[in-house]
Image (spheres, rainbow, N blue to C red):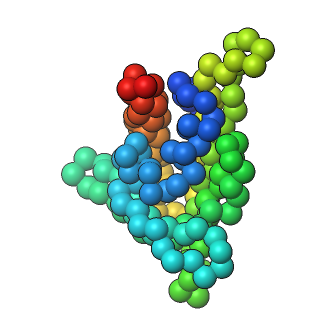
């Protein structure tokens, strides 16, 4: 399963990148990301323990993942992949964020387009109902992220 969504953010790529480059920041704007803790890394890559949680009526599905950043090309692209250390085989999870400046005049950045791509190789989160739930979480997350960046501008 792959979900790709685009949103325009009222900020430079540098400002927006700060909110997508660190998984610890995700719970503030993406309610699908229920809890995050940064982990010690033994290979030099940043790693996080991430709990995802989605509600379908009175039921909740949750999943705990160890994610590492495999690409960190600030302020343009970041990619996180599941990387468990328990020696067992696990379904793949890949989250990629790509930021592209939107210019209105030469040299003037008005906004940034954020493309988020979630690729999942398992079966727990599949099906039309859960696909819709994930889409809803992504839409709400994009709106919250836009609001956070706009509010930060208002305080300046």
Q: Left of 75 or right of it: where is 60?
A: left
> Residue 31's x, y, as percent?
36, 47
Q: Left of 35 or right of it: where is 122?
A: right
> Residue 94's x, y, as percent?
62, 58
Q: Quadrant of residue 53?
A: bottom left
List the single residue furthest toward the right: 106
> Residue 62's x, y, as percent?
36, 62
On screen, 71 above or below 64? above
On screen, 138 above or below 22? above
Residue occupying image coordinates x 51% and y 77%: 40
> Residue 16's x, y, as percent?
56, 38
Q: Left of 31 or right of it: where is 74?
A: right
The quarter of the image holding the C terminus is: top left
Res 88 visible: no
List the single residue furthest toward the left: 58
Given residues 108 and 39, the one toward you in this image is: 108
Q: Quadrant of residue 87?
A: bottom right
Residue occupying image coordinates x 59% and y 73%: 83
Residue occupying image coordinates x 69% and y 13%: 104
List the single residue furthest toward the front: 156
Given residues 3 and 127, the one toward you in this image is: 3
On screen, 104 above or below 23? above
Q: Quadrant of residue 145?
A: top left
Residue occupying image coordinates x 44% and y 50%: 26
Res 77 visible: yes
On screen, 114 above or below 109? below
């Amino acid at each position: 399963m792959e979900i790709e969504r685009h949103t325009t953010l009222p900020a430079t790529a540098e400002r927006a990148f700060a909110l997508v480059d660190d998984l610890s920041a995700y719970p503030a704007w993406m309610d699908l990301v229920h809890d995050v803790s940064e982990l010690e890394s033994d290979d030099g890559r940043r790693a996080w323990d991430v709990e995802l949680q989605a509600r379908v009526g009175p039921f909740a599905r949750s999943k705990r993942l160890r994610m590492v950043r495999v690409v960190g090309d600030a302020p343009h692209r970041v990619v996180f992949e599941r990387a468990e250390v328990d020696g067992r085989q696990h379904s793949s999870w890949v989250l990629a964020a790509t930021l592209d400046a939107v210019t209105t005049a030469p040299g003037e950045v008005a906004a940034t387009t954020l493309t988020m791509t979630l690729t999942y190789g398992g079966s727990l989160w599949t099906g039309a109902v859960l696909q819709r739930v994930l889409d809803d979480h992504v839409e709400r997350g994009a709106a919250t992220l836009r609001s956070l960046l706009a509010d930060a501008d208002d305080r300046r």
